[in-house]
Image (cartoon, rainbow, N blue to C red):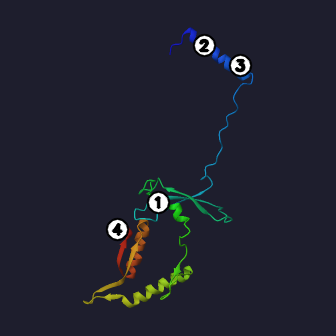
Amino acid sequence: MQVTRRQFFKLSAATLGGSTLTALGFSPGEALAEVRTFKLTRTTETRNTCPYCSVACGIILYSLGDKAKNAKSEIIHIEGDPDHPVSRGSLCPKGAGLLGFVHSETRVTFPEFRAPGAKEWTRVTWDFALERIAKLMKDDRDRHFVAQNDKGQTVNRWPTVGFLAASAASNETGYLTHKVLRSLGIVALDNQARV
């Protein structure tokens, strides 16, 4: 850049005038940066899987609460997990609205039971629900288990029950689910990903 002698004197005079005015107290006020805390700084980060469809996108749940159990932890923010191999941090509109799903007033968070002939659902304990499911499964398996077919070959089948596995589960969970259900003799085993 070429500066002429005249331009040099003009620039020097402007600089000297500006510094003189500042020294006399005509400077602007201090500019302070606004100090704000990021809303997720005190949160606990938990990785999970979106529950909606069989794509199994990865999500990150941010909860705020005392880890010493003095205050109940509450989920305050949900976003896509950029490290997840399926979704790479992107979510569909339903997945992006998961916070509303978590805090919905109509979301059922406990087991309910409707007795035969009853019109209303009643709240029951988890122990009651699990024991009832186990009892009904055992009764049905005892009644319908097929140990041998017509030719006398051992088949060990339980043909009256089917199972729909979750597609959001890991490979290990899928393997264990398959082993447990096949050991019970369940023939109709499918996965949500095919639905």
The amino acid on which the numbered mark 3 sits, given as a three-letter code, is Thr
In the structure shown, which secondary structural element does the residue marked by tag 4 occupy? helix
Q: Which residue is mark 3?
A: 20
Q: Quadrant of residue 155?
A: bottom left
- Label 4, label 3: how far apart the Cα atoms are: 78 Å
- Image location of residue 103, percent across then percent down: 56, 65
The amino acid on which the numbered mark 1 sits, given as a three-letter code, is Gly
Towards the viewer: 18 or 182: 18
In the structure shown, which secondary structural element does the residue marked by tag 2 occupy? helix
- Sequence-first disc among 1 and 2: 2
Residue 120, relative to residue 47: is it above or below? below
Q: Are marks 3 and 1 in contact (CB under 8 Å)?
A: no
In the structure shown, which secondary structural element does the residue marked by tag 1 occupy? helix
- Image location of residue 17, percent across then percent down: 67, 17
- Label 4, label 2: how far apart the Cα atoms are: 78 Å
- Image location of residue 131, percent across then percent down: 51, 84
Q: Are marks 4 and 1 in contact (CB under 8 Å)?
A: no
Q: Which residue is mark 1?
A: 95
- Label 3, label 1: how far apart the Cα atoms are: 60 Å
In the structure shown, which secondary structural element does the residue marked by tag 3 occupy? helix
Which mark, residue 10? Answer: 2
- Label 4, label 1: how far apart the Cα atoms are: 20 Å
